[in-house]
Amino acid sequence: MKLDDLLFGRRIRQNHALEHATITILSDRIPELRVSARSNSDGFTIFGDVDLGQLRIALDEALSRLLAGEAELAIHPNCGTNLAVGVTMVTLGTMLGLASTHTRTRVATAAASSVAGWAAARPLGEYVQRHFTTLPDLRGVRVTEIARRKFFGMTFVEVRTVQE
């Protein structure tokens, strides 16, 4: 077992890749689409109302394109991984800057370090997605269920997968 599978779990990483590819394809077809999603070992959940027919078509296309080697579909610019990496980088930059022994330039150093951290966040976040939080190898993965649900007035769609 590889370290990245151990940290995040192979099935979660595969579902995360399928989630990204599906949302990318849906967004290309529905430019006004405003949803978020979260992956787990059983599939993923889309928070927002989407047409189930269009979702099924996008899922099938995402799965086939990932299986055909379009690994870049697994990387999404709005992924929470990018946000988490960004917050971490800005926090580290600020802490390092504030730890400066030069009291007269401490705030400027913290600000500059924070900006540098923010600038590095997106490319580093995409690196983390590519190598740790997604896995575009979906051989044997199959969608088993798509279900719309409502909870406290919020609509979400659950996509369930299995690996055969």
Image: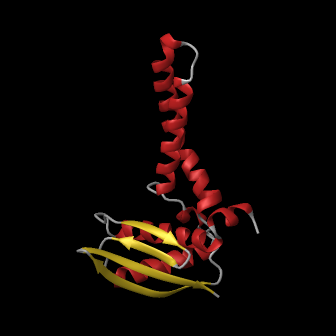
Residue 143: image x %, image y %?
51, 85
Relative horizontal placement of residue 45, taking residue 4 as reference (left or right): left
Q: Farthest residue toward the top?
A: 104
Relative horizontal placement of residue 140, taking residue 88 as reference (left or right): right
Relative horizontal placement of residue 87, taking residue 140 as reference (left or right): left
In front here: 27 or 7?
7
Residue 72: image x %, image y %?
57, 62
Residue drawn 55% across and 35% down?
92
Residue drawn 48% across and 37% down?
118
Residue drawn 64% across and 69% down?
9
Can residue 68 be seen from the camera position used here?
A: no
In front here: 114 or 106?
106
Relative horizontal placement of residue 100, taking residue 114 as reference (left or right): right
Quarter of the image where the C terminus is located: bottom right
Residue 117: image x %, image y %?
52, 35
Residue drawn 39% across and 72% down?
46
Residue 62: image x %, image y %?
50, 75
